[in-house]
Image (cartoon, coloured by chain):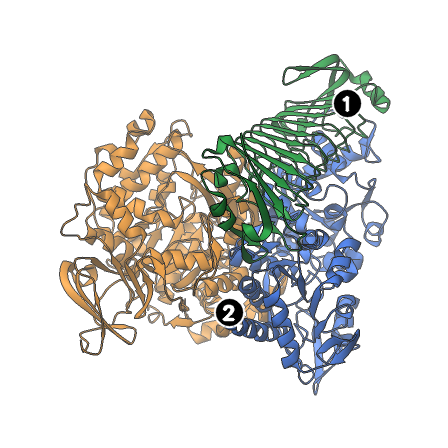
Amino acid sequence: MEYLLKNGYVVDPTNKIDCERKDIAVKDGKVVESVDESRAKVIDVKDMLVMPGGVDLHSHIAGSKVNIGRLFRPEDHYKDYEVKSGVRRSGVGHSVPSVFTTGYRYAILGYTTVFEPATPPLKTLHTHEELNDIPIVDKACFPLFGNNWFVMEYIRDGKLEECAAYIAWLMRSIKGYAIKVVDPGGVETWKWGGTVQDFDQEVPRFGITPREIVRGLVKVNKMLGLPHPVHIHANQLGVPGNYKTTLRTMDAVKDLASGDKPALHITHVQFNAYGGVDYLSISSRADDVADYVNKNPHVTIDIGQVIFGDTTTMTADGPFEYKLFTLFRGKWANTDVEVETGAGVVPITYSRSNYVHAVMWCIGLELALLVNDPWRVFITTDHPNGGPFIEYPRVFSWLMSEKARERVLKRLPRLARVRTHLRDIDREYTFYELAISTRAATAKILRLTNKGHLGEGADADIAVYNINPKEVNPSLDYKLVRQAFSRAYLTMKDGEIVVKDGEIVSAPVGRTYWANTRAPKDVEDVVIPKVKKLFEEYYTVRFENYYIPESYLACSAPIQPLEPAG
Amino acid sequence: MVELKLKIKAQHLTPIEGEVLTPDNLAGKSVNEILNLETWRGNRRVKLSELFTVEGESASKPSDLHLILEGDLRKVRHIGSRMSAGKITINGPVGTFVGFEVTGGTIVVNGDADAFLGMGMSGGVIEVNGNAGDAVGSGYWGTRCGMRGGLIVVKGNVGAELGCWMKDGTIRVGGNSDIFAGVRMQGGTIFIAGNVGAKPGAAMVNGKIVVLGNVPNIPPSFHIDEIRPSTKVDGDKIQGPFYVFYGDITEGGNGKLFISVEKNPHLKYREAYIF
Amino acid sequence: MICPSCGNLCDDNEVYVEGNKIVKVRTECAISSSKFLNYNKERNTKPLVRMGGQFKPTTLDDAIEQVARMLVEAEYPLLYGWSETSCEAVKKGIELAEEVGGVIDNTATVCHGPSILGVQDFGEPTCSLGEVRARADLIIYWGCNPSSAHTRHMKRYASLSKGRFRLPEQKKVVVVDVRKTPTARNANIFVQVKPNQDYELMAALKMLLGNEEIEEQEVAGVPVEQIEELAELMRSCEFGVLFFGLGLTMSEGKERNIDGALTLVRELNKWTKFAIMPMRGHYNVTGANKVLTWQTGYPYAVDFSRGYPRYEPGDTSAVDVLSRGYNDATLVVASDPVATFPKDAVKHLCSKHLAVIDPHISLTAFMADVVIPSSFIGIEEGGTAYRMDGVPLIMKKVVEPPEGILPDVQILDLILKRVRELKKGR
């Protein structure tokens, strides 16, 4: 099938194209130099904004904890439902949508790749079963390692090569993509009912600190040549004053970076950029964090923006979720997973009139606006922790329009405005920067070389928005921006039209990417049998049953990591 | 008020969706338009004309419309759903979810109602001249919030979990209630003229439950406060004497149970705990 | 080999196959060995259709046709069961229910449905079974009898298991039940609770944990001093786990009992680490709920009659649909409701069109109009299943089913295809 998207204004930062009138030719699922206009289907996208499909690197859409969120929030679903029609299966939405609805709604936003950022290895088959059922978008999942018994013991004993072999084996066995760390050491501590107070505090019974865990994993990541830096949710999330831990976490691996290549990605930094000593005095330290990021190219961040309204928090950070429960005394789910990690789920309503929530709202935007390089700061809401992904267009409008921000700011508690910096920031994102932060840069940091851009050879994952970037001033007409990005005029996935004028017209199966990681054979041959032996002692499933065959992925897309370094 | 009468034509097997049957939905429409309105019978779309005969006419405003439904309506669910004004009289036994999330107006049932009567109600009046089922005045699953206002009166008996998670409003029961009356109550008032099943007021944090009949037991998480000669329900004086229990202590609750002294001699031993 | 019997989903059984037959099983569990060795006995191998009151063998095509017609013609079909089959089959079942605009429900509706209802109000502090084995020093079995129903539970996961941080001798077992069950006979402490008063006992425990006085000498038949001891035991352990079963979910109060248990365990987390876990019965009842949740947003009792999932348990749940006489046709897959449902529900079930997909002539199949034989998951067919703690495992196929017998997922797929053809024609 050949297509020609004619007369649109293309924004393709990877190829340095900024709102240029350009035709995009598509053939056999790829962007090509040109097609025969007489044979191709011509789609006139005159004066519309043409971008690569969105690439969301951090969104909780699939797996055990997401499903717990779905299960225990029928009230989140019953007023927001989708009727079955045509190719579209029925489902429910809002903060924890059912799987079909998740894929459709992302595609309608013009997103074509979405990654689940936290999966417990033991239950990753569950994550894949859900990912398989999410239509249209390409996806992957990040297994959790920061509280893993094997990992902690290897790092403690200085056995990094063995650790790398273990992680390589695990990554390819359960079809994961990158190393995810959540509250390193903290979740294991929580399994005894405690929490990590300090980045250099020892984890009980393991004799290792969060700092050591993070450094060890960054080293292993380099050794394995995985396609993404270590993706970390830092210690002390949600705790006033935690910005210090964030800075220390970033600084802890500075010496491990090679050149300009990022060594660490810190996620939803908004939740980790707090000053103050308690919730009464909580303030924004986004400036300190942004300052560090500006000066240190070895880190990338995503913001984790808060949206006012009802949503559901869910994270592997079990102790943090318990803390939320003690504050709200509402619903609370917790699932510790043997050997590996944990999870917690707590519904939340972010309210404009709540001082703490108002401060949080400011911080997310500050991070995006104070970090200068859009190639290193990505727009997310940590869906659904900050807010549902369907609200991304609202975030875009805030970033692109000071007026839009002001409208919200003036309704926030005065003290929240005083203790944050947002009201003093007048920077506004351009369409070009938006495209970087939501497509080009995220594809790059995930080493998805065929995504996030519209150059020749790229996957034909394209989003067309009904907004004329030459005529519309996003600073003033932010409502138009929000409307346009809420319903793509056209979304194309692998050269197939999936969304037409905001409606799903086709629902193909997306790919599941995973890193087919290997460590040197001689090391693996020694390490894996030892792992197998310990398996019986540590786990309640057998070593043979831990493995997920590739056939269990609806559309398996293994990525070969780079050659192991050194 | 203008009367519009819908009589169900036949006994049905599969459930009929009664959401469309409210003054809000039927006001301002001609009888013909009403007959042509569609609803669900099981998974089939059917016109109201297939299900009901219509007499009378509609009013232009919901508050002027008195909708009368006649016949065996046990298979009709969600009648009066999200109603805001006007009146519905149901002459016959009726199905589940009568008055779901109703905000105003009046519903009268001359017959027995099924479960989930007045679920999510926040205003208005529901009166049942008959019995009602389980979970009267409760809330949708997961909301942790039941009825938020309005008045429910059931002349006969009610099932279990009366007023579950109730936040405000009043429920009056002329007959008996099954177990867990007022469980998880957060406010409002429940009055039961007859007997209640075990564990009334369990896990309540606020609100008031008055029982004139027999109670097999009080949850152990309540303490006895005093004996009062009488109490008030929405300004009406109710003659006691009553044992007054407060709790649920495990929830840090300030709810109160007023239990008839006369009908509960087995609770006499609790008097020793009155300070 | 993973055993397709109970919610333990033990994956360490050894099964020896010769030709196409299982000849030997090495397992510690009588239920498991019986399943692997006897599954093939007394099974139905032919599609059957009822004609003139009798079962007559028919072709698979004919049986599929009849089921498809039944579903398409029905105004409110009920698709029930799902707990003894693979997740793949459940997914097909959901697609089918959505296509025919019916209600899909699984056995949780008569089992741990109340647990789900409780979780929907309070959440659930829980963990995987390996966490229990590694750390728990106090294990409470409340209203369940694993010695009989989940035979290897104690040895594999709980009180008799060897954990990284906790040896068996460091684990204490408390059983709370209405009678001295086999599990209770092997417990350190047995608390006999009066029937239907578990809630009161839990409330009393919460009172004592909060240092409040109870205005009784005994609660639920248990002297307050004994309740005090239990409260102290719970408060002072390092890691406690409360396992519970139908003693709580199906006694008076149902989901309110689970409310009591969940909030009790939540409170205990103030003092120590405590988790709670329902003892799920069938080997994939958990999986069925999980698939329903991720595909529809709701865990069971899902009504598709209006073209989208609706959830009103107590009205859209199988027993209620049947007791109120809502449905005009039923498809039962991998379950036996005639054997377990209340009388009124069974009466209605049998009075309407009934099709059954099952390897055996169960009581339900015996009452059906159409019966389609299917294969056994975990023996003759693979697929995913979920353990009681949500850990997913891949069931294996080691022998072929008898000639002409298909797995549930394929049968459902054939029905779905035929349903779509019939709908197009209408």
Q: CA distance from mark 2 to mark 1?
A: 74 Å
Q: Chain of mark 2?
A: A
Give the chain letter for green: B
Q: Which label number is shown at residue A26? A: none
Q: Residue B46 is drawn in which quadrant? A: bottom right
Dot 1 corresponds to which residue? B212
Give the chain letter for blue: C
**Pointer 2 local density, CA inside 10 Å: few below 14, some 14–19, many at least 20:** some
Mark 2–mark 1 contact, CB under 8 Å?
Answer: no
- Residue A4 visible in the displayed image: yes
Q: Residue at x 46, y 33 (%)?
A: B61
Q: Is residue B126 left or right of residue C257?
A: left
Q: Chain of mark 1?
A: B
Which of A227/A309 is in front?
A309
Q: Position of residue C307 (x, y in %)?
A: 51, 57
**Mark 1: which amino acid?**
Leu
Q: In terms of secondary structure, where does tag 2 sit?
A: helix
Give the chain letter for orange: A
Q: Is residue C8 left or right of residue A35?
A: right
Could you confirm whether marks 2 and 1 are on the same chain? Answer: no
Dot 2 corresponds to which residue? A527
Q: In terms of secondary structure, where does tag 1 sit?
A: loop
- Residue A422 visible in the displayed image: no
Up the image or down, A307 lies above or below C22; here it is above
Q: Position of residue C326 (x, y in %)?
A: 67, 54
Front disc: 2 or 1: 1
Q: Residue A13 is drawn in which quadrant? A: bottom left
